[in-house]
Amino acid sequence: MVQLKINNINVEVKEGTSILDAARAAQVNIPTLCKHPDVDPSAGCGLCIVKVGGRIMRSCSTPATEGMEIITDDAELKQIRKTVLKLILSNHPNDCLNCTRSGSCELQDMTAQMGISENEIIKMVPPLPKDETTKCIVLDPAKCIVCGRCVNICQKVQNVWALSYLNRGFSTKITGANDTPLDRSPCIKCGQCAAHCPTGAITDYDNTQKVFDLLSNKEYTTVVQIAPAVRVALGEEFGFDFGENLTGKIYAALRRLGFSKVFDTNFGADLTIIEEASEFVKRFKANDHLPMFTSCCPAWVDYMEKYYPENIPNLSSCKSPHQMVGAVAKTYWAEKAGIDASKIKVVSVMPCTAKKWEIERDETMRSSGYKDVDEVITTRELAKMIKKAGIDFKHLKEEQADNPLGEYSGAATIFGVTGGVMTAALRTAYFYITGSELETLNFHAIEGLDAVKVAEIDINGISVRIAVVNGVGNVGPVMEQINTALAEKKDLPFHFVEVMACPGGCIAGGGQPRVMGATFDKPWGINDEIRKLRSKGLNCEDACAQNRLSHKNESIKKLYDTYLGKPGDEKAHHLLHTKYEKRDLYKA
Amino acid sequence: MSEETSKAAEIADKWRKKRGSLIMALHEIQGIKGYVAWEDAVMLSERMDVPLARIYEVLTFYNFFKLVAPGKAVISVCTGTACYLKGNDKVLEKFKSELKIKEGESTPDGMFHLQCVRCVGCCGLAPVCVVNGKTYGRMTPEQVPEILEEWKKAFKED
């Protein structure tokens, strides 16, 4: 521990703590636009300057040391910060009225906080084109303040290396290697760059108008589904606490928007578990391409196809839950409802930007003959639609989902949290192998935000080794362990591995709200505290659920009995499974 | 694999084990080819296990590195303080209009490459231009066509 004085207040912090973080311990907020708790300091913005014994230093990248005397705010520092911010603003467009980030923009907030109403510095906004090539995220370099958060996240946290700095000084630009457009780069569309961008430089590829158009087109029956993680985050856009589960209100809002049927991706999650647990049990018994990797996360699938193509046979062939719901809606439900599949449109509300890409992945995503899912919007986009439609979300009465594609178990809802898919799959796999239920349904070793969580589960005397990778950037060492064992024909370290690309899981996905919580420190957006609160929202729903097992979902049982046959059978395989292909890191 | 590319592969293998040696490898490649091509960067990335994005961060950070083949004759116009004050800006304009290219570009026939440099260390001769190592002192815009002719002739004789 080191002791120091910040604005004459005595503070004691752990050695190595930055001055910026140490100041928080003294209830002092030092302004910054580049430092985010998820990334290393880049010392990019220059706003966090403080005086250390009279010398001006950047507090984000200067560690607090014993006996320091620090001033965080005086007339000179105020003046310098103002000039620095004016320089940043001088090459940022005055586009707030039309900008999707308006109201949740850190630059806008900082400008208001510093009271900058005029800027005498000549405006020089470089005329750089937007990169909309991924159709998932939009990179607008004109709005970029080169804080470096996205690059740090993409390279060091996610280990994807799509984004990078090009050139230097005034002409620095965030883009792919040698200015490669993102759709031809290693980008996996996880959207963590968008989740951490302080301005409107990286945002969703907006599909809200397309969805409004579908809703006003009477030729189609447009149905909707929401992912597990959406229900514990959407409320943040309407003044609810972080992690509050608002499933019933969201159903009500979706009906008011005009969707004919409100389904739930959680139904698809239960269906995924039936298929995936069956697949795992079969592969485990036959020692066929183990370990098996989960395949619900499209960003992870994309990563596997690009970075570990030799391990593609290890991926589960199951589609992700929302694709399954789409496929079932356009076949089983279409028949039941007596509607031609060509007249049904499926919209998915997802916490994820990569899902926008997933629906176009390959021809298996059109298993009914039509697209399984027609449009994907993120949680943020749904909030925009609700506001645009004049719906008083806060006071809506709770409603129920439409059956049969609305019923779900507790196992389904935890799909949105790291470790959740594995937990849900083990509950059902245990039943498939032993014929009886687990005594305790939770596996504490694979809960929480650790990078890699491992456990050994005893199923009737057989030991099943599992790993949960929290964030795709942590998958490297696990793959190395596995591939070494495979090459040397040794005992596998794991039989079953869950990977979710976004740290924390879908609850912290690239499409989740980034609003300011009154009780939270800046910077806004995601941090571990919020990850924990949203996870808690889903875990509580599971803990209190009447049914916590996918294989006890009555609507799913009926779906198999009356339509699909057995898990993995021809019909189920055609509708609910996919295939994978090697993809180049860079496309010509 | 072309001869130059296989040479680049050799360079990559030579440096791969040494941490922080990316710049050395890029220097060597540029030394052979005069620039670092996309294929070379991709190969370095694979063989040295350095992400391509990082390689281009380095390549575009340092002005020294070239990403396209420079012309056979590289014309360096000094725009350091002394040369600039002595009128090299007008010499630069003359080169641009004669060659119909901007600084940092090469002529479509690959004959000339035009670049600006900051001080070549002989301010007494200002304004100065250097073509492939040959120094031209006390330059005037009128000399520009003569110099271009001289190099065109030299290449013809090759």
Image: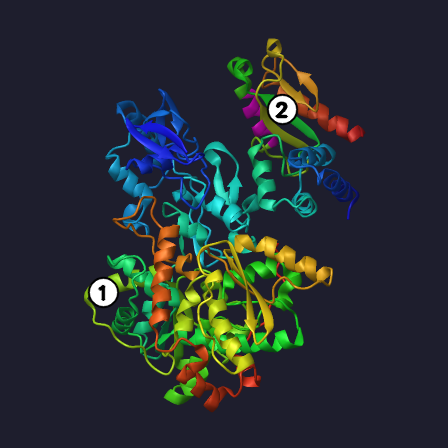
Please state the chain letter of the residue tagged with numbered disc 2 in the rendered image. B
Residue A49 relative to residue A487: left or right: left
CB atoms of marks 2 and 1 within 8 Å: no
Foreground of the two, A133 or A102: A102
Disc ID at residue A393 = 1
Query: How many numbered dots are placed on residues in this image?
Result: 2
Residue B95 sits inside the magenta stretch: yes
For the C terminus of chain A, the quadrant is bottom right
- What span is in magenta? B90-99
| Foreground: disc 2 or disc 1 | 1
Q: Quadrant of residue B79?
A: top right
Residue B22, image x and y in percent?
Answer: 65, 37
Can the viewer see residue A187 in this picture?
no
Q: Is residue A542 left or right of B158 when viewed as pictured?
A: left
Q: Look at the image and say whether residue A203 sits in the magenta stretch.
A: no
What residue is at 34 percent from the left and 77 percent from the top? A546
Which residue is at 52% across, 83% downward? A435
What is the x, y in percent for residue A222?
35, 76
Determine whether A77 is above or below A315 in the image. above
Count neighbours of disc 1 (C-alpha within 10 A) and say few if under 14, some if 14 to 19, many if 20 or more. Answer: some
Q: Quadrant of residue B19?
A: top right
Q: Residue at x 48, y 35 (%)?
A: A171
The amino acid pointed to by label 2 is Ser
Picture quadrant where residue B111 is located: top right
Name above or below for residue A241 compared with residue B127.
Answer: below
Q: Residue at x 61, y 45 (%)?
A: B52
Q: Nearer the viewer, residue B67 or A295?
A: A295
Does the rendering let one see residue A16?
A: yes
Residue under numbered circle 2:
B76
Element class at badge 1: helix
Residue A411 horizontal/vertical position (percent): 42, 72
